[in-house]
Image (cartoon, rainbow, N blue to C red):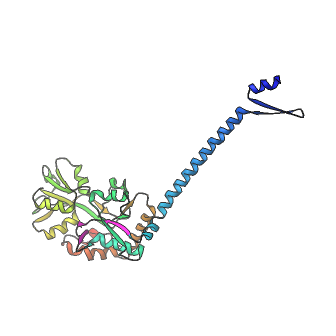
Amino acid sequence: MHIRQEYATLATLFYFRKGAVMAFNFKGIFRSSAALVLGGAIMLGLLACGDSKQEETKKQESAIETIKNNGKIRIGVFSDKPPFGYYENNEYKGFDVYIAKRFAKDLLGDENKIEFVPVEAAARASALKANKVDIIMANFTKTPEREKQVDFAKPYMKVTLGVVSKDGAITSEEQLQGKTLIVNKGTTADIYFSKQSGINLLKFEQNTETFQAFQQGKGDALSHDSTMLYAWVKHNPDYKVGIQSIGEQDVIAPAVKQGNKELLDWLNAEIDTLQKEGFFKEAYDATLASEFGSEITADMVIFAE
């Protein structure tokens, strides 16, 4: 009894059987149990992480299947930027729209299985992030800043910045010093000239507002993609593109939500196919050729074989 009491105090239980002593240390048991619980928690955590990653992969892999199940593809375009994307007579038209319809045809078998979603320049990336659209085809110039927000596919168009003024009076960037320059919010022109000093920027959300303000004399000049400016001055002969190119040549490409690799891969393969078959030249001839003057040729605008 005395021995049992002493060992009980030490939290040890003894069994005496045929002269052999078997001891179980409670403290050891508690430690082992704690280790098992901790190990189980870690395993559950790892399994949960694994399930989360698998679920995310599943979501990405099912992007195209989701579009097919919905029976339509949602593509963000401009509604007020002729001849690239605009709404007229109850339908969307323009170069970007022409290409977007081909995407729908090749993915879903019908060019009409498409929902055009009008977007503003400054809201193109956010429309993808918020899952409001599957693809942006709103004359989206690829820039390092934008690459941090969306995933760009291969380009289908070339572009530079230009500057238009009354009678083409402004012919150099230096002449913009101290002047008021009108731009669209969130455009490449906005990004570029916001980094330049000595130029007063007047910004508008919509293309319609931008050009109306310019014609109303609210600015000395307007900067936009040179291709759009050439199309605009053809219908507004009192104005000329005095600066045809500023900075380096950029490219325009479709964009998808970051991480949507399946749709991005499909777009890249589709663009390769369309380029090889001369589709972009077809789209140019159908929507842009008549809008440009002799200053612009197809090889200045599109990527062709």
Foreground pick, 4 / 39: 4
* 212 with respect to 132 (left or right): left
Q: Position of residue 271 (x, y in %)?
A: 38, 70
Residue sitting at x 40%, y 73%:
273
- Location of residue 297 (image quadrant): bottom left
Residue sitting at x 58%, y 51%:
47
Residue range in magenta is: 73-88
Foreground pick, 89 / 5: 5
Residue 240 on the magenta segment: no
Q: Main secondary structure of the magenta part?
A: strand
Q: Position of residue 90 (x, y in %)?
A: 25, 73
Residue sitting at x 43%, y 65%:
263
Instruction: Give the residue furthest to the right.
Output: 18
Q: Quadrant of the C terminus?
A: bottom left
Q: Position of residue 172 (x, y in %)?
A: 15, 56
- Location of residue 135 (image quadrant): bottom left
User: Does residue 149 lie above or below 155 as drawn?
Assistant: above
Q: Quadrant of the N terminus?
A: top right
Foreground pick, 249 / 99: 99
Q: Is residue 275 visible?
A: no
User: Does residue 76 lie above or below 191 as drawn?
Assistant: below
Q: Is residue 249 visible?
A: yes
Q: Position of residue 163 (x, y in %)?
A: 17, 59
User: Does residue 274 lie above or below 214 as drawn?
Assistant: below
- Location of residue 296 (image quadrant): bottom left
* Count of numbered circles on the image: 0
